[in-house]
Image: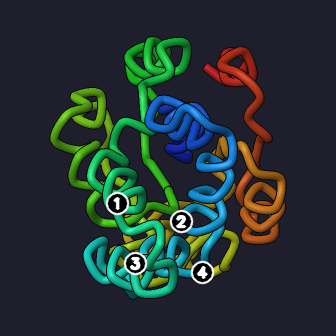
Amino acid sequence: MNFIFDVGNVLVDYTPVVYLRSLFADESSVNKMLEVIYKSPEWLQMDEGILTHKEATEIYCSREPDYIAAIHKVMQNFDKTFTPLPETIKLLPRIKEAGHELYYLSNIHAEIRDILLENQDYFDLFKGGVFSCDINYIKPSPEIYRHLLTKYSLNPKDCIFFDDMEQNVKAAEKEGIKSILFKNADCILKFI
């Protein structure tokens, strides 16, 4: 069986609000930065590989000139948004030892991809995977699932996909991939 994992909120805890609260004492700044950065179309365009981190930062600053310092503060330290989820990470060697292969499939932009691959050694356990920024498609687009299957010659019937977003799970199922809505690491155990 091929185990395919989303990254955010499956392999790593992705908590922008917690991160923003570590940077700003007041909730109004937290909410403003959530709107300006994380809920912006540019955030998705970075995931798609259409915009670089630098280009998006420039757009944010030109759009919100009163918040330039805050925007730079968030964008210079955004890697602190991601911390490994130990309950999932500790299962990866067990999955491999049971004879299964590991793959990742994630919406992520290039700067975060590079930081994760450089600093999270559990990626060495993976046979491969796809980051959205590398192929200009994001989940739930069918092309991203098809790309992974084609790139590694995977039969969708031999795959199981774990993602924390229902729309991504449903899209994978449309491609014939058994998919599980990830709530916690317990949902993985019954498939090992």
Q: Position of residue 94 (x, y in %)?
A: 45, 13
Residue sitting nearer the eye, 28 or 164: 28
Q: Amino acid at mark 4?
A: Pro
Q: Are marks 1 and 4 in contact (CB under 8 Å)?
A: no
Q: Amino acid at mark 3?
A: Cys
Residue sitting nearer the eye, 84 or 34: 34
Q: Position of residue 17 (x, y in %)?
A: 62, 39
Mark closer to the observer (1, 4): 1
Q: Amino acid at mark 1?
A: Ala
Disc nearer the start of the sequence (3/1): 3
Q: Are marks 3 and 2 in contact (CB under 8 Å)?
A: no
Q: Secondary structure at mark 4?
A: helix
Residue 123 shows up from this direction? yes
Judging by the rendered image, the residue that carries numbered circle 3 is 61
- Residue at the spot x=30%, y=78% of the render? 52
Judging by the rendered image, the residue that carries numbered circle 1 is 69
Q: Position of residue 19 (x, y in %)?
A: 50, 35
Q: CA distance from mark 3 to mark 2?
A: 10 Å
Q: Are marks 1 and 2 in contact (CB under 8 Å)?
A: no
Q: Quadrant of residue 8?
A: top right
Q: CA distance from mark 1 to mark 2?
A: 13 Å
